[in-house]
Every structure is written in structure tokens, then in C-alpha cells.
Amino acid sequence: MATPYLPTIRPLTAVYRSHGDYEDLLEWGSFRYHSLLQFNKANPQAEESIALTNLWAAIATDDENAIEDAAQRCFDIMFPFIQADYAWRSQSSNEVNLNEPIKLQVITRNGILEAVQHNRHIKYPINDPIDNVFPDLPIFTASEIEIVEEIVWNVSKIKLENSIYCLKSVHRGGGELALKRELSILPHCCHPNIIRFVGLIEPVDRNDKIEGMIIEYIPNAKSFQDLEVITPIECKRWTTQIQDAIEYLHKEGLVWGDAKAGNVLLREDSNVVLIDFGGGFTPGWVEQANSNTTQGDWQGFERIVEFMKTKAVL
């Protein structure tokens, strides 16, 4: 028997904070789901309570990997109920208002997890377009681009004037501050190992606003974080390239920011490129006290080199 076709599940946004709830918004086919997880005051040992407690603990330590794992656990608790609802609605003849999300809260009652309806509202997109305070930068309208595919949440492969680029939207988690920081750095960079800026993108109906920025697209890019084996020759060459890029930035009075292996990509020609200039820090790579400083860049660099050495083989 052939496997029935299932539309792609498209994550839209997730919202969580220390000692707060976990909310998730996704599209599945023609349905949009807004799921909610709250601490169960009547049962602190309930599955949802434990998952949220672990998420809060991860947030308190600023451990990005632990936060990601804990948030994934929260989503995993809710997803079977989303899956069941989707299966029911796909076969139901009842009409659904596709402009309104389906609101599901998962809660433990009498020792059993179940889904109920909630009345929360979640803003989407999570961030508004920002004011265009960059009059000297090239700008394109949304009508000029064609979205080819979404690479990760709110980062898309696009086609513009018969060329392929990457669109990084303001609707990503970092929002206005992160985008403005990148726009204060990337347009001023010209280095083979730093991602190349192309232009700004504005909404169709608002020429005084910015939806995001267009940067070069790197075909078949690999993240350093995902490399399993690195030869000593590669380690030496990539160390030199990353060091040269950081020295270039600092000479220009600029700072990379969130220096870590996950923000270094490998091109098809086996040369590296630094990405993500939105600022910040990641525990284990850059300490909070060194956030957005030249010291932080060098601290991250040293740990990237250490990371490469752990992957190096003779």
C-alpha cells in the first residue's frame, strides 16, 4: 500500500522565557497550530511541569544546546496531539477557518496527558519590519524576489535577477537589534572568508520599512559544527583563514560577535566563511562578559581551533 502524502510541517515561531510558558506556532498543510504548555500547579511532577522546569534551568545557565534540547522536549510532548488533530481534520468534512490557528494546550489530568483548547494569542510574524535608516544601501522590493525554499526558520534561498541568494528575515528571533547590527557590519566588509552582503529587502507596500537583508548563497554549505573529521592540513588552512578574517574585522573597527563553530561554514571549494553578525554570545564558546568584543572574538577563535583539533586525524 502506498504511503499517503503528508504536507510539509513548517515551523513558524516558538516563544518561551524563564519561568514562563512554552508556545509554538507551525503550519501543517492548510492548518496553522498554536500549541501551549503551562506549568501544572496542581501537579508539579506532571510531564509538562518537569519539561518546563528543565527549560527554565537551561535558560538560567544561558546554555544554548541545553535550551534547544529542553525546548524540543516541550514540543515533543505536544506534537502527538497536533498529529492526532491533523489526522482528524484531514478526514473531516467540517469547515475550518484557515485564517485562525487551531489552539491546543496539553495538560495532565487524572494522571493522563490530554489536549484542551486555550484562548492565548501569539503574534505572527513575531517581529515587525524595521524602519529603513540605511539610505545608502542597495534595496529591492519583495515583489522582485522569488522564494525557492526555506533553509531554516526565516532564512530562505531566493532568486533575484536570475541569480541565487539568501534572504535573512527580520522575523528571526533576534529581530530588529540583530538585523541592525549585521547591517552595521556586513555592508562594510570585503573579505573572501566573510559572508557577502547584497542588499536590503522592503515590503511591497512600505518603502520606508525593511523586511530583511539579502546575502550571498553558499551552495551545499557545511557547518563546522557538523564536521566529523578534519585533516591536519585542513585544520591549519582553516585556522589561518578564520584568523585572517577576524584580524580584518578588527582592523576595520568591527566585531564578529557570536564566534563559534556553528557560525563558520565551509564552501564547496573547501574555504571557510564567517556568518551571523547579529551579536551575542554562546556559553562554551564566548563568555557573557566578552559578548560583542574583540576579546570575545579571540576567545571564540581559540575554542574553534580547539574544536577543530578534536576532529583532526592523521
Image (cartoon, helix red, strand yellow):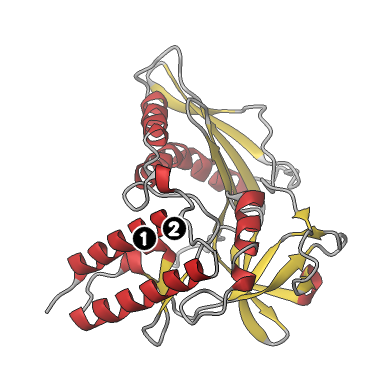
Judging depth in this view, the residue of 2 and 9 nearest the camera is 9
Judging depth in this view, the residue of 206 and 1 nearest the camera is 206
Q: Is residue 58 visible?
A: yes
Count neighbours of disc 1 (C-alpha within 10 A) and say few if under 14, some if 14 to 19, many if 20 or more. Answer: some
Determine whether the residue tagged by mark 1 lies in a helix, strand or loop.
helix
Label for residue 294?
A: 2
Residue at point 51% right, 33% down? 17
Toward which corner of the image does residue 226 lie, by quadrant? bottom left
Residue that sits furthest to the top in the current view: 42
Q: Is residue 90 left or right of residue 192?
A: right
- Asked if 92 appears above or below 250 in the picture, the reply is above
- Find residue 152 and report its horizontal and vertical position in percent: 52, 62
- Find residue 159 and report its horizontal and vertical position in percent: 67, 79
Residue at point 78% right, 73% down? 140
- Find residue 25 and report its horizontal and vertical position in percent: 59, 44
Q: Is residue 166 visible?
A: no
Q: Say if mark 2 contacts mark 1, CB within 8 Å.
A: yes
Residue at point 36% right, 84% down? 270
Q: CA distance from mark 2 to mark 1?
A: 6 Å
Residue at point 37% right, 51% down? 286
Toward which corner of the image does residue 137 lie, by quadrant? bottom right
Q: Amino acid at mark 2?
A: Thr
Task: Check the picture and name the quadrant holding the C terminus.
Answer: bottom left
Judging depth in this view, the residue of 146 and 48 nearest the camera is 146
Task: Check the picture and name the quadrant holding the N terminus.
Answer: bottom left
Label for residue 298?
A: 1
Toward which corner of the image does residue 61 lie, by quadrant? top left
- Find residue 109 and report its horizontal and vertical position in percent: 44, 18
Q: Is residue 289 left or right of residue 309?
A: right
Q: Amino acid at mark 1?
A: Trp
Count neighbours of disc 2 (C-alpha within 10 A) and say few if under 14, some if 14 to 19, many if 20 or more. Answer: some
Determine whether the residue tagged by mark 2 lies in a helix, strand or loop.
helix
